[in-house]
């Protein structure tokens, strides 16, 4: 088995690791023949180059790394299939056509619901009790291709974007490892997505964490606090126009209880400490 993996962040590493362990054929013979990931970026005060978790994984196992999918066109890789999980860039048709069995995409929603960049945040914000993951064969449209497999996952009352994302990708790794061989042998029937049920999400921006403590319902604010954790978090404006981050909150008898906040330019404090320092925020 020869796979090219497209991905970048740490939470997709279970997919890489599971495929590697299950299909490794000997020392130095990983089924992952190459990865395509985001290029290293300067970070911190000294602007040192920081390599993506997928890049580091590949380096440790002497797997070749590409920083652009277009590099594959001239790479002459002998590969059957691509696997994509949170890569972060559009893949051209020319690249898709390089793979005899196509590129399989791991998308954390039950497609065609929640296509786009923020399906997990949308599910939590909307108060859904269940979500899942779709593994589909990529085509030229975003999150549009035929479905190879789906599984459902309950959303817990205390789930944040981070905890739910970790759980979904860990399960995805197991599911993908079981289905990839039958898929490559043509034993799985693909299912066309129902366009009538398609919904869409957007890229999350910092301003999407804004809440109005007077107008928004307690339930909405609490759900948004979990959906936007750890980034961008939720925040509001005080009457003096200062920005207040709401770091922790919970519901109690239908009321929103603020636990920890941070005034702009200040350190995080408990809500009790904040109200004592600013009795009329």
Image (spheres, rainbow, N blue to C red):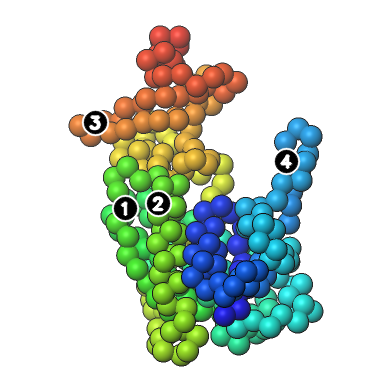
Q: CA distance from mark 2 to mark 3?
A: 23 Å
Q: What residue did someone put label 3 on? A: 252
- Mark closer to the chain start, 1 or 4: 4
Q: Quadrant of the C terminus?
A: top left
Q: Secondary structure at mark 2?
A: helix
* Residue furthest bottom in the image: 186
**Circle 3 crowding by C-alpha within 10 Å: few under 14, some 14–19, many from 20:** few
Q: Secondary structure at mark 1?
A: loop
In the picture, the disc for residue 80 is: none
Q: What residue did someone put label 2 on? A: 164
**Circle 1 crowding by C-alpha within 10 Å: few under 14, some 14–19, many from 20:** some
Q: Which residue is rendered at x = 32% and y = 60% of the image?
A: 153
Q: Quadrant of the N terminus?
A: bottom right
- Mark closer to the chain start, 4 or 2: 4
In the picture, the disc for residue 155 is: 1
- Mark closer to the chain start, 3 or 1: 1
Q: CA distance from mark 1 to mark 4?
A: 34 Å
Q: What residue did someone put label 4 on? A: 43
- Mark closer to the chain start, 2 or 1: 1
Q: CA distance from mark 4 to mark 2?
A: 27 Å
């Amino acid at each position: 088995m020869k796979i090219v993996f497209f991905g970048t962040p740490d939470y997709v590493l279970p997919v890489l690791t599971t495929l590697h362990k299950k299909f490794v054929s000997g020392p130095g013979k990983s089924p992952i023949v190459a990865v395509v990931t985001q290029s290293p970026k300067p970070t911190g005060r000294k602007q040192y180059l920081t390599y993506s978790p997928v890049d580091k994984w590949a380096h440790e196992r002497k797997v070749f790394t590409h920083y652009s999918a277009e590099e594959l066109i001239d790479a002459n890789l002998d590969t059957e299939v691509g696997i994509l999980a949170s890569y972060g860039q559009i893949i051209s048709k020319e690249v898709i056509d390089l793979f005899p069995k196509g590129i399989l995409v791991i998308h954390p929603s039950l497609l065609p619901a929640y296509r786009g960049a923020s399906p997990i945040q949308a599910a939590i914000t909307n108060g859904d009790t269940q979500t899942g993951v779709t593994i589909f064969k990529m085509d030229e449209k975003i999150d549009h291709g035929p479905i190879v497999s789906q599984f459902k996952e309950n959303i817990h009352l205390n789930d944040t974007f981070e905890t739910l994302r970790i759980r979904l990708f860990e399960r995805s790794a197991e599911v993908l490892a079981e289905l990839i061989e039958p898929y490559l042998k043509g034993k799985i029937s693909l299912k066309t997505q129902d366009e009538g049920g398609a919904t869409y999400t957007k890229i999350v921006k910092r301003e999407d964490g804004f809440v109005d403590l007077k107008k928004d319902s307690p339930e909405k604010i609490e759900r948004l606090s979990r959906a936007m954790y750890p980034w961008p978090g939720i925040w509001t404006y005080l009457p003096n126009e200062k920005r207040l981050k709401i770091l922790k909150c919970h519901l109690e008898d239908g009321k929103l209880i603020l636990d920890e906040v941070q005034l702009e330019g200040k350190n995080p404090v408990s809500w009790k400490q904040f109200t004592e320092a600013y009795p009329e925020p």
